[in-house]
């Protein structure tokens, strides 16, 4: 009973910390990230400082755990707190940054190249997936199927050109079929290990917490949740449903604006599918890291940080994409940021789609790799519940 009470108290403390920062963020006055009113004394630098504090907390907890100065559970609490603070700092930085606007003359190459790039990159991905699947994983055709699906993500806008692509059944099939295929791969190749790992309550709660924070970061970085509304919005509450294109096809979007908070929220099925899939993949990776740390502690081991670092690195790479252009503006000026914007942020660019599908493959691959590493190096008791 004492162990359960201690675990419950830790969960309450984590929830309290996250709630405090969330409420504090909502109480920031309506600011002009886009040139409206006063910022309440806040600026981009405050977001950077907050993010750096979070990185220090995260790194400090990892180093202390590595040196066995703290228990793995305490280290996970510190890492989670660091992730929360870093995410809130990044959200604050993004919200207080002026939206960059670039002239077409700053494009690194004309948009007339997009069809050729999309078709060539997409078909190259499909061909490489077939070859790699044939020679490397001949008994796992599901990997080739995932590669083919990812290639279709890139080629689809030019396979069915024009407005017809916004509502074509193939587009909806690609978006809806991707999480189904990813889920099948994880269930087939990692399900038995994940079921055992998820019995560890600490690892499970850590993974869920990380997934929730990452989902909040994604929707904030992409503007689907904002505490810094644009200038010109009405002063009364607004609730409306509008069609919008998000990831290949058109979806109904529920928009809610509450000026007294202030808060803007937009929800669409496409957004829920993509953000839900990515945050779930990251949360499962985080669960494996947490479980690995706890198993190391039980076995008296200190090695294995490289594997955890690889997973953390892949997740960091996938999560930081939406901030690339604005960070480049701050660090190097608009002359360098403009090409990055057109390549990775412009919705018409095939490379922006490539970033999304690369994140899906990266997170799925790191999860499968981690599970197979556990199977090769650990005994069955290593994945038994530690509680």
Image: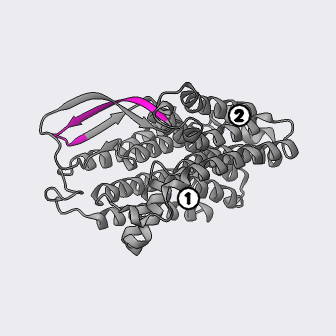
Residue placed under numbered mark 2 in the picture: 185
CA gap between label 2 and label 1 equals 36 Å
Q: Nearer the viewer, mark 2 or mark 1?
A: 2
Under circle 2, the secondary element is helix
- Is 86 on the left-hand or right-hand side of 97? right
Q: Where's residue 296, x and y in %?
A: 69, 52
Q: Earlier in the sequence, mark 2 or mark 1?
A: 1
- Residue 3, visible in the rendered structure: yes
| Quadrant containing the C terminus in the rendered view | top right
The residue at 56%/35% (across/down) is: 160
Q: Which residues are magenta?
A: 249-263
Q: Where's residue 159, x and y in %?
A: 60, 37
Under circle 1, the secondary element is loop
- Is 29 on the left-hand or right-hand side of 316? left
Residue placed under numbered mark 1 in the picture: 70
Quadrant of residue 325 within the rendered picture: bottom left
Which is nearer the eye, 339 or 46? Answer: 339
- Residue 374, visible in the rendered structure: no
């Amino acid at each position: 009973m004492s162990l359960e009470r201690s675990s419950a108290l830790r969960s309450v403390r984590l929830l309290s910390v996250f709630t405090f920062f969330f409420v504090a963020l909502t109480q920031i006055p309506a600011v002009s990230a886009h040139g409206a009113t006063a910022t309440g004394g806040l600026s981009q630098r405050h977001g950077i400082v907050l993010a750096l504090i979070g990185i220090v907390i995260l790194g400090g907890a990892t180093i202390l755990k590595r040196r066995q100065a703290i228990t793995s559970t305490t280290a996970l609490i510190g890492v989670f707190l660091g992730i929360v603070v870093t995410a809130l700092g990044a959200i604050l930085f993004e919200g207080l940054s002026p939206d960059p606007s670039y002239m077409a003359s700053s494009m690194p190459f004309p948009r007339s190249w997009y069809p050729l790039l999309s078709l060539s990159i997409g078909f190259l991905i499909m061909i490489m997936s077939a070859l790699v699947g044939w020679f490397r994983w001949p008994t796992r055709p599901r990997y080739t199927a995932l590669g083919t699906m990812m290639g279709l993500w890139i080629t689809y806008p030019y396979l069915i050109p024009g407005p017809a692509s916004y509502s074509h059944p193939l587009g909806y099939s690609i978006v809806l079929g991707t999480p189904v295929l990813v889920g099948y791969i994880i269930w087939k190749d990692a399900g038995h290990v994940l079921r055992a790992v998820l019995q560890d309550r600490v690892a499970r709660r850590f993974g869920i917490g990380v997934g929730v924070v990452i989902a909040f970061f994604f929707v904030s970085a992409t503007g689907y949740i904002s505490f810094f509304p644009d200038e010109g919005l009405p002063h009364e509450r607004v609730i409306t449903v509008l069609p919008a294109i998000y990831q290949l096809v058109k979806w109904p979007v529920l928009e809610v604006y509450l000026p007294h908070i202030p808060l803007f929220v937009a929800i669409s099925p496409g957004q829920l599918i993509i953000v839900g899939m990515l945050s779930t993949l990251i949360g499962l990776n985080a669960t494996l890291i947490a479980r690995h740390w706890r198993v190391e502690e039980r076995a008296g081991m200190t090695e294995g940080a490289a594997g955890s670092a690889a997973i953390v690195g892949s997740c960091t790479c996938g999560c930081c994409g939406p901030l690339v252009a604005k960070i480049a503006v701050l660090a190097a000026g608009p002359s360098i940021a403009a090409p990055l914007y057109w390549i990775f942020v412009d919705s018409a660019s095939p490379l922006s789609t490539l970033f999304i599908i690369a994140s899906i493959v990266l997170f799925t691959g790191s999860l499968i790799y981690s599970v197979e590493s556990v199977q090769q190096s650990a005994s069955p008791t290593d994945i038994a519940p530690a509680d």
